[in-house]
């Protein structure tokens, strides 16, 4: 459906919008937000709030599966979905990383009001990204047994994890299409529409989870099918909105060309951002291997804790993306000073958010872990609480690091976050394996926090070096 919407056009389309000052293009521009003037703090909040709600809803895809599986199937299936979630996120964040990279190009082209280039970039991103996603789907299906062995997945968990992942992998194209459409909308300052359609998809996902898992007893395969169907719906809705409401973003026949310079930037931005996002989850995958060595109880505790962390990270991720969009539009328009002011306002906003969220995570850790585990588990709950309380003490550094990532991406320096992520992974994995036999999940929390501190120091160095240039 999305291919039809973005490629197949009525015969009158080229006559309808031949130039930018036509009524339909003006209407489309009114659906966007120009970030080149006005109150910076207010604009960042307006960008970040829908992004935050969207990221929280995205976490519901994972959390709803885990909660319903845990309550209606059992602890082994719950652990299987936890292991599968870590593997899935490795590939999903690779796919979304491509969209994060090209979204910077979208925002810079929109800031410069290069709408011809904008449409050519949409064509390139759709064509190249879909091909990349198909290849990734095939490779992930072929390598699934090896991946599960690599992370030391217990035998009683591996079968159900594999069944869940095969269905999820087959839905990767829907994941890419939704993230690409959301990137287009966000690059022009419209963060509300992706949220709207994601909310619809989250509701559908929850309903289908209850139907497939609770009513039809389909187990983990039912939860995976519900997720894929919901993602297809959100992708179709977003693409239809772009077609009808933002016509200047829909490429035409004359835009379907390979622009050498734009192609080079698309590949570089997309692949570097995908590398940064996926390398983060390679580290998480390796840490999952260390946790798996502790047995099913610790796997369940870590699964519950990371689901909670996913919601906390939503605040940092949404703030970073808002900063990136703001900085990219202003950088594209040549307003570097305003871009720096946006980063300064953004980092203050992130610090306040972090202090509020992490205080709640520390004090309510027992209730949160019990909620995800269904109230049971004498061994799991203390392990999960220990992890959450230790890691919450370090989260300020996570949010500060995310702010720097948003600034670097917005200015086109997409290679710098990769360096920071690689360093964080090295520290987190090494310390986790070194300490886990003595401290169990507390070791993972300490290792994670130590990595964040070092990355913030590195990013601060890069930032001040850039300002002196």
Image: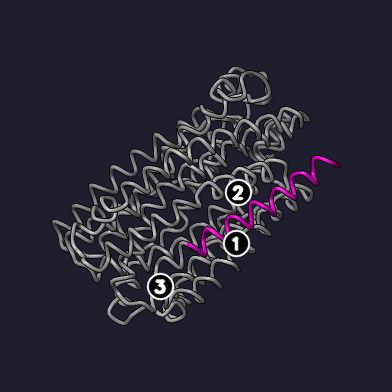
Q: Is residue 441 left or right of residue 464?
A: left
Where is mark 3, residue-wise? 291
Q: Nearer the viewer, residue 137 or 387?
A: 387
Residue 437 x, y percent position in the rendering: 42, 78
| Magenta stretch encompasses residue 189 | no
Colour basis: one colour
**Residue 465 within the magenta-colored segment of the rendering:** yes
Q: Secondary structure at mark 2?
A: helix
Residue linked to disc 1: 424
The crowding category of the residue bearing disc 1, from other C-alpha atoms within 10 Å (few below 14, some 14 to 19, many at least 20), is many
Q: Closest to the observer: 318 or 436? A: 436
Give the percent coordinates (x, y) of residue 161. 33, 71
Residue 96, labelled with which disc? Answer: none
Give the residue at mark 2.
Answer: 401
Q: CA distance from mark 2 to mark 3?
A: 25 Å
**Residue segment shown in magenta:** 446-469
Can the viewer see residue 290? yes
Instruction: Pick the residue in front: 456 or 195.
Output: 456
Query: What is the crowding at mark 3: few (fewer than 14 residues within 10 Å), some, or many (at least 20)?
Result: many
Mark 2 and mark 1: span between their CA atoms? 11 Å
Q: Quadrant of residue 29?
A: top right
Q: Answer whether labels 2 and 1 touch (C-beta < 8 Å).
A: yes
Which residue is rendered at x = 53% and y = 24% of the image?
Answer: 31
């Amino acid at each position: 459906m999305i291919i039809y919407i973005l490629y197949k056009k009525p015969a009158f389309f080229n006559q309808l919008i031949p130039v930018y000052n036509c009524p339909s293009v003006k209407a489309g521009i009114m659906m966007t937000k120009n970030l080149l003037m006005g109150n910076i703090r207010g604009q960042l909040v307006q960008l970040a709030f829908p992004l935050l709600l969207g990221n929280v809803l995205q976490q519901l895809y994972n959390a709803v599966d885990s909660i319903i599986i845990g309550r209606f199937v059992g602890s082994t299936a719950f652990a299987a979905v936890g292991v599968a979630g870590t593997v899935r996120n490795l590939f999903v964040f690779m796919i979304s990383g491509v969209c994060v990279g090209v979204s910077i190009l979208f925002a810079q082209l929109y800031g410069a009001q290069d709408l011809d280039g904008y449409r050519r970039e949409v064509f390139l991103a759709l064509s190249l990204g879909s091909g990349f996603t198909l290849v990734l789907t095939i490779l992930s299906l072929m390598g699934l047994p090896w991946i599960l062995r690599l992370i030391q997945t217990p035998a009683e968990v591996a079968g159900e994890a594999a069944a869940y992942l095969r269905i999820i992998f087959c839905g990767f194209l829907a994941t890419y299409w939704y993230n690409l459409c959301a990137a287009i909308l966000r690059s022009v300052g419209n963060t509300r529409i992706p949220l709207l359609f994601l909310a619809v998809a989250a509701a559908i996902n929850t309903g289908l989870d209850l139907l497939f898992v609770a009513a039809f007893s389909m187990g983990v395969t039912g939860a995976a099918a519900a997720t894929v169907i919901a993602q297809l719906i959100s992708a179709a809705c977003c693409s239809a909105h772009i077609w009808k409401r933002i016509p200047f973003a829909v490429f035409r026949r004359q835009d379907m060309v390979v622009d050498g310079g734009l192609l080079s930037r698309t590949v570089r931005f997309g692949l570097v951002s995908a590398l940064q996002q996926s390398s983060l989850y390679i580290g998480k995958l390796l840490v999952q291997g260390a946790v798996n060595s502790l047995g099913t109880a610790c796997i369940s505790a870590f699964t519950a804790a990371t689901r909670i962390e996913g919601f906390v990270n939503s605040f940092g991720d949404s703030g970073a993306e808002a900063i990136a969009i703001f900085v990219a539009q202003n950088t594209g328009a040549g307003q570097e000073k305003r871009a720096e002011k946006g980063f300064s306002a953004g980092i203050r906003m992130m610090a306040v958010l972090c202090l509020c969220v992490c205080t709640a995570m520390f004090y309510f850790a027992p209730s949160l872990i019990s909620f995800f585990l269904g109230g049971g588990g004498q061994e799991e709950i203390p392990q999960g609480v220990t992890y959450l309380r230790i890691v919450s003490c370090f989260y300020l550094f996570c949010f500060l690091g995310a702010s720097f990532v948003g600034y670097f991406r917005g200015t086109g320096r997409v290679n710098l976050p990769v360096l920071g992520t690689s360093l964080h992974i090295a520290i987190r994995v090494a310390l986790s394996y070194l300490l886990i036999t003595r401290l169990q999940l507390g070791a993972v929390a300490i290792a994670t926090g130590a990595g964040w501190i070092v990355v913030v120091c590195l990013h601060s160095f890069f930032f001040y070096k850039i300002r002196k240039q």
